[in-house]
Amino acid sequence: MNLHKQDSTLQLETDVLVIGGGPAGTWAALTAAAKGSKVVLADKGYCGSSGATAPSGTGVWYVEPEVKQRQEAKLSRYFMGGRLAENDWMDRVLDQTYENMNRLAGWGYSFPIDPEGNVFRQGLQGPEYMRLMRKLVKRAGVKILDHSPALELLADEHGVGGAAGVSTQGGDPWRVTAGAVVIATGGCAFLSKALGCNVLTGDGYLMAAEAGAEMSGMEFSNAYAISPTFSSVTKTAYYRYASFYYEDGSVVEGAGSTKGRSVIAKKLLENRQVYARLDQAPADLQPLLRVGQTNFFLPFDRMGINPFTDMFPVTLRLEGTVRGTGGIHIVDDTCATKVPGLYAAGDAATRELICGGFTGGGSHNAAWAMSSGSFAGEGAAAYAKSLGQHAARREVHGLSSAPIVSSRTYGSTLQKPPIAAEEYIRAVQEEVMPYDRNLFRSDEGLRDSLYRLDRVWKSIRHEPIHLDYQAVKRREAAAMTVTARWMYRSAQARTETRGMHKRIDYPDVDETQRYRLITSGLDDISVRAQRVSEEAVSL
Amino acid sequence: MWLCIKVCPTNVFDRTETGLPLIARQEDCQTCFICEVYCPVDALYVSPYADIKQQVTEQELVSVGIIGSWREIIGWGRGRTRLAEIDETPFIDRILPPQGTISS
């Protein structure tokens, strides 16, 4: 049945629908509204607090438009990323980020000024930034739907024309028809509780793929953050000041926050607990570190641990594609997907264009979110405008791979699904969380995982979904399942080690594989290679 | 509407018949500390434990001054200086030990 047949359905018509209200989504909404579009923004949680940015502090790739500085900035992660980033895209993102950050200052973000009068614009405090973005979006006349996860895209034969979902507060369905849709739903961290990441379950990937969009770089999806074993706070940057120890205080040789993260993973796999202590942080810096990432210290303060002087147990928490670089494949400068009317931005879109196969936290990610959001917002506004009057007359239908049925119509006659969403989720987590499956990959391991993941997908993809709040969990389970399958299919195809993608059976870079891997399909997944723009980043 | 019900990204709270918020789905809590920082009356405490339930009493939290502490740190609430205005951490980024090549 179609979602719009229910009486209580909230129905809206708009030019541009943005799905996701983090940095990318809010920049997309602001930009589209500035171009004169009527905009609706639907967030799975609350626009202003949802996602990886809101609870954190983040560095931003803000670089003065000066040749030498820009050149150094572009080179800084180019080789770590396996030379898959593109010069033109880095230029565009550096320009757009510079512009957006300066705009934020004009709009009232309080950037700090040092005693010499220099303004610092290389960082943002998450709660502050996202609260301001919400305010700006509302002021621009954008209609915000909070706690309103999208469950499926709507389309006709010409392309995507809206989305439908359900309110998790009240349970009423919603349906928005639109000239263009921007997917800004973030990446997928597989409900690992990495800070702020549990709303990031790959929903946008699934919906985009159901519409026919492709993914790119899904092999670059094995980011793990260092965090205290007990805590959700995954702020890895500060661990550059850490030394790593065994329980008896002896040093774990080779362990580190960047190059040595694999050593930590290997020890944890051997069931040897690793401890950290930030004892390399100079005393005069410690107060400044507290200002930069206040929430880094929250769990420690609450447990009476001084991380500069006390050892505490650490683990590696999966961040998947949130701090990996894979995502929806972008086909032009407007962040369009290959499906007419469908755009992608932020972590939902591939970040390979500026990061290649590796990224840290913050910096490039924050820059990509705000820049790609702006590009996509502008592109979507122009596309919606080009449709003219035609847009409102379109007969669009839902694209979900599993049928979504109204619980009000079928009531209790619809059987409770035999397998709970939580069971599917656990099954997927068992394939993507273990370090010896996802961090250290091998053909054998990938094949085993894919065999099981394909079975999960076959089971979940045909089960009808009740249109109530449980629908959200079932769609999340489906999204995580298909995301894991794309990850491992492309990981299987890349028979080398490049960027963050590590194959223990192919430990070296193979220069003949300096290309992107584009993944498509839901039931049958295919992988193809696409050349990277040859324009070199000069040294 | 109560702010915690509104701002929780994972919809952990419900509104009870009396209108007061209730922690209805603690298993969905991702310990992101957002509810705590938004609460204007410092009535919420987010545990440092992500995966296990911590037994606490309001009295002990108040006595050690934890309740409302993050809101105070980031300077939200009347009469406080917002942390964003004094955050100069990009400076730190420049003197962090160099980031190595990717892990091997």
Image: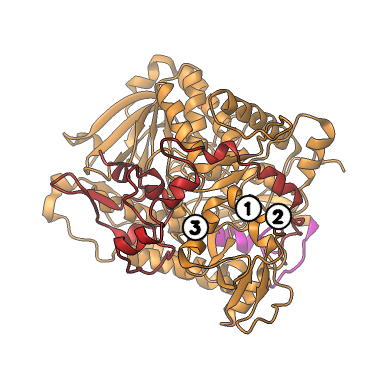
Chain colours: A orange, B red
- Label 3 vs 2, first from the N-terminus: 2
Question: In which chain is the residue bearing label 2?
Answer: A
A295 is within the stretch colored magenta: no
Whether residue A394 is situated above or below residue A57 in the rendered picture: above
10 Å crowding of disc 3: few (<14), some (14-19), many (20+)? many
The residue pinned by badge 3 equals A298
Q: Residue at x 57, y 51 (%)?
A: A293
- Quarter of the image containing the C terminus of chain A? top right
Labels 2 & 1 near each other (Cβ < 8 A): yes
10 Å crowding of disc 2: few (<14), some (14-19), many (20+)? few
Counting labels gives: 3
In this rendering, would A201 be left or right of A400?
A: right
Where residue A402 appears, x then y in whole percent?
Answer: 33, 51
Badge number at residue A287: 1
Q: CA distance from mark 1 to mark 3?
A: 14 Å
Boundaries of the magenta span: A487-511
Label 3 residue SS: helix
